[in-house]
């Protein structure tokens, strides 16, 4: 059956999952454009590439449902071809080929040249930093490394992404310069593990040196750090954070749990005492730092006592930003050998209790911001408000600043100065201040 799509030979890239997948899709699109292909992101096209996530159950279900939706569109003649790439495809390719055989071809996370060839394009090695960004024009993700060498028991990422591989500083600077030339003002540094950056190619943890190179890029105003690992964190990064105004006083450091026996079973390589000491050192060295963390509840063997210890620790540490996930039992991980013995309803109840505590902490911390004057970048207009963020907030996951659009005209991607007038659990409201 002929497709009903008006646009022939238009490639629609659909992205699922985390910021690393967003980055990978942007690189794919940049390569396709360089080969003269008509490529769009999550719009109509008669050729579809689905960049999947295979991290936890919910993400896998979303990826499979998306594949099935597009297979139905193919059957109905609305699209011609469907290709699947990304983490789910890397992890379960034989199963997917058996269960959903009508997909034109499956590709893993390291098979970009093969995917491009299937799409009638050539892989161009010389395209360092060439991407079609899909984020709002003012910020972009900068992936500084691929893969992970950590042995965390619950995590399937090494199965899908392989060993840690750092990108050289000079390549990242070139990429940052190209992003800045296109109007990007905020770089969000991502990797499975920022802490490990440089060990493979420079034989030392080199995140601080990378930051010192990136702050010299004209046009970049904010540099934000995502996904650090607590064990072996390079403390010289804090010195750069203090010294360089462009490096946001912000760190995303997933800690997962705090009970020693759970941390040991998770193979995190740390203890409650060491973790608490590290966080206190962060706050002592960079008093203005916002710390974002994520936790897992319902891990195998997590007792009520373990959970109460975690709750108390969250209460005591007063994280500025926090997210909580329920444990997902993933095959071929070390923890899959353990009994998934915490019932699903108990997992969800524990996650809700953690987030209730965090909601109160966030409300209390936000109240202290009333009357403060903050630098805010405008991400979008939503209803009657311009919506922006401070240096203490990352897109999509953190607090936002809302400014009455009937009182002010602001441009997306621009920085403005705002006096905070009102604060809720996760939102601030303010007025523009003119100097």
Image (tube, rainbow, N blue to C red):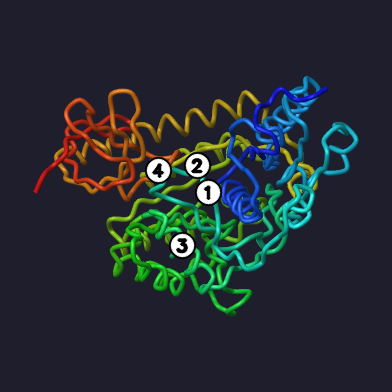
Q: Are marks 3 and 1 in contact (CB under 8 Å)?
A: no
Q: Which residue is mark 1?
A: 258
Above or below for 187 versus 81:
below
Secondary element at tag 3? helix
Residue displayed at 70% across by 29% down: 66
Secondary element at tag 1? loop
Q: Are marks 2 and 1 in contact (CB under 8 Å)?
A: yes
Q: Which residue is mark 3?
A: 178
The numbered disc on residue 309 is 2
Q: Which of the two discs, 3 and 4, labels the residue nearer the N terminus?
A: 3
Q: Which of the two discs, 2 and 1, labels the residue nearer the N terminus?
A: 1
In whole angstroms, how far apart are the C-alphas of marks 2 and 1?
Answer: 8 Å
**Rendering quarter of residue 146:** bottom right
Q: Which of the two discs, 3 and 1, labels the residue nearer the N terminus?
A: 3
Residue displayed at 38% across by 54% down: 183
Instruction: Work out which residue is located at the far bottom of the displayed protein and give it.
Output: 203
Q: Which residue is mark 4?
A: 321
List x then y, in percent, for residue 116: 73, 52
In front: mark 2 or mark 3? 3
Q: Quadrant of the N terminus?
A: top right
In whole angstroms, how far apart are the C-alphas of marks 3 and 4?
Answer: 31 Å
Specify whether 215 is left or right of 342.
left
Specify whether 81 is left or right of 221.
right
Instruction: Work out which residue is located at the far right of the displayed protein and give it.
Output: 98
């Amino acid at each position: 059956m002929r497709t009903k799509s008006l646009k022939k030979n238009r490639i629609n890239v659909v992205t699922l999952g985390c910021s690393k997948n967003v980055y990978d899709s942007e690189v794919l699109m940049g390569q396709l454009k360089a080969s003269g292909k008509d490529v769009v992101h999550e719009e109509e096209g008669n050729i579809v590439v689905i960049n999947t996530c295979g991290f936890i159950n919910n993400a896998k279900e979303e990826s499979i449902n998306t594949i099935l939706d597009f297979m139905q569109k193919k059957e109905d003649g609305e699209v011609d071809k469907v290709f699947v790439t990304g983490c789910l495809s890397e992890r379960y390719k034989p199963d997917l080929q058996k269960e959903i055989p009508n997909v034109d071809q499956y590709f893993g996370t390291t098979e970009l040249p093969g995917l491009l060839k299937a799409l009638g394009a050539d892989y161009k090695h010389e395209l360092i930093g060439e991407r079609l960004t899909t984020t709002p024009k003012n910020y972009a993700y900068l992936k500084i490394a691929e893969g992970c060498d950590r042995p965390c028991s619950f995590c399937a990422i090494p199965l899908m992404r392989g060993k840690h591989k750092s990108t050289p500083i000079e390549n990242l600077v070139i990429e940052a310069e190209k992003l800045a030339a296109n109007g990007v003002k905020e770089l969000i540094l991502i990797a499975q593990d920022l802490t490990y950056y440089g060990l493979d190619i420079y034989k030392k943890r080199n995140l601080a040196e990378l930051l010192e190179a990136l702050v010299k890029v004209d046009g970049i105003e904010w540099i934000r750090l995502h996904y650090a690992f607590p064990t072996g964190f390079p403390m010289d990064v804090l010195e750069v954070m203090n010294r360089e105004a462009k490096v946001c006083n912000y760190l995303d450091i997933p800690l997962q749990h705090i009970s020693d026996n759970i941390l040991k079973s998770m193979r995190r390589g740390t203890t409650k005492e060491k973790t608490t000491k590290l966080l206190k050192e962060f706050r002592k060295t960079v008093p203005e730092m916002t710390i974002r963390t994520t936790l897992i509840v319902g891990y195998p063997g997590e007792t009520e006592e373990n959970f109460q210890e975690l709750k108390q620790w969250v209460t005591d540490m007063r994280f500025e930003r926090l997210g909580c996930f329920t444990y997902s039992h993933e095959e071929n991980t070390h923890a899959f050998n353990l009994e998934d013995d915490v019932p699903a309803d108990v997992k969800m109840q524990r996650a809700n209790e953690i987030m209730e505590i965090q909601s109160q902490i966030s409300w209390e911390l936000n109240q202290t911001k009333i009357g403060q004057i903050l630098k805010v970048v405008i991400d979008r207009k939503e209803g009657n408000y311009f919506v922006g963020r401070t240096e203490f907030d990352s897109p999509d996951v953190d607090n936002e600043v809302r400014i009455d659009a009937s009182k002010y005209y602001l441009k997306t991607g621009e920085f403005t100065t705002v006096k905070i007038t009102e604060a809720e659990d996760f939102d601030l409201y303010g007025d523009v201040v003119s100097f």
